[in-house]
Amino acid sequence: MENSQETEKNFKENKKIVFSAIQPSGAMTLGNYLGAIKSWNQMQDKYRCIFALADLHTITVRQNPENFRKNTLELYALLLACGIDPDKNLFFIQSHVHTHTELAWILDCYTQFGELSRMTQFKDKSKKYADNINAGLFSYPALMAADILLYNTDLVPVGEDQKQHMELTRNIAQRFNGIYGDTFTLPEAFIPKTGAKVMSLQNPSAKMSKSDTTPNSCVLLMDSPDAIMKKFKKAVTDSDSQIKFKQNEKTGINNLINIYSTVCGKSLEETENEFDGKGYGTFKIAVAEAVIGTLRPIQAKFKEYISDPGYLQEKYTQGALAALDISSSTLKKVKEKIGFIL
Ligand code: TRP
């Protein structure tokens, strides 16, 4: 089989191992794309990449079954459309690979109550979902540690909000290695340079988020060109008129400069020069057009993939089998060290 040969080649080339995952918790935003997926894409040649849909993490917040199933399949198709190559990398759905939950339970027993209590994401989500502060929400970082440690991961591209979980992952790994001898590779978090942090178009001091209920604040990857144009035209700016990036000042314009530069592969200065002397109105339309142009081929490919469930199934099954194969040997090693009868 050509596919598995290519995967095997990547594994043998001694490239550093990258692991990352994204939750299928709803529609993907322009922020998810520019902040994470685009840089995943660029890592595919340089590293041996392992990407997963972290659906087990998603059920820490109650999901409607039909929507959950739809979101997961659509996200798989959308990532393929964004250029994630399932033949070059491992690309699978977390819940298909049972070693993740198994190692997560084990790591739960090497993670302290105090450590998990200090996680800011847990504290935030406990406030947000006060009627469902379940044990999974609490031990979420141990499952994330399992995801990462199963694959001898060297590097984990994550956003700022996951850095604390990465520190905990390292602590768990170090603790385990300290007790049983070298078992886990110590992974390092890295915030990809190419990834831009995209802010809300209506409240540019907050991150763009699909759960933001303010109309026109968030661009979705599958938004129509008209919707995208409208959202950018309505983007909040300031009373000045210069298209200049000024840290901590012109947050709205900074965000638009950032989006335009990332989408067009230009530096901030190049964008500033290009729009020197032009007005905000012209600039907003240019940003919208650039985004529409970038998303057009992705949207077209998404439609192709999502209408071919047989192909999707073939790819996520192939990914899960390969992931199971690699992760099983780590799990076996762990169980042996702890003293389980194998
Ligand atoms: N917790 C991550 C998020 O919500 C998703 C995730 C799960 C992840 N497992 C991971 C990210 C392992 C990096 C590595 O963004």
Image (cartoon, rainbow, N blue to C red):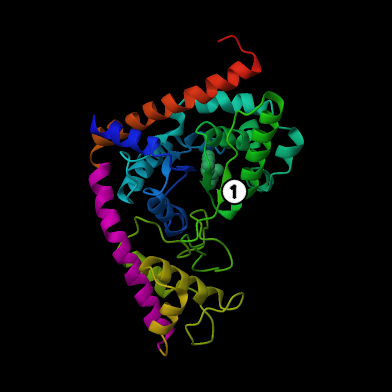
What's the magenta bit mostly, secondary-structure-wise? helix
* Quadrant of the frame with the C terminus: top right
Please say if 313 is above or below 335: below
- SS of the residue under disc 1: helix
The local crowd at label 1, few if under 14, some if 14 to 19, many if 20 or more residues have their Cα within 10 Å, is some
Check the image and name the residue furthest to the right.
114
x%, y% of residue 232?
41, 71
Closest to the observer: 285 or 95? 95
Query: Would you say residue 67 sits in the magenta stretch?
Result: no
- The amino acid sitting under disc 1 is Gln
x%, y% of residue 119?
69, 44
Q: Is residue 72 left or right of residue 181?
A: left
Closest to the observer: 39 or 260? 39
Q: Residue at left 36%, top 41%?
A: 76
x%, y% of residue 193?
50, 60
Check the image and name the residue furthest to the front.
13
The residue where tag 1 is placed is 162
Q: In this view, does 219 lie to the left or right of 173?
A: left
Q: Identify the magenta region.
A: 278-306
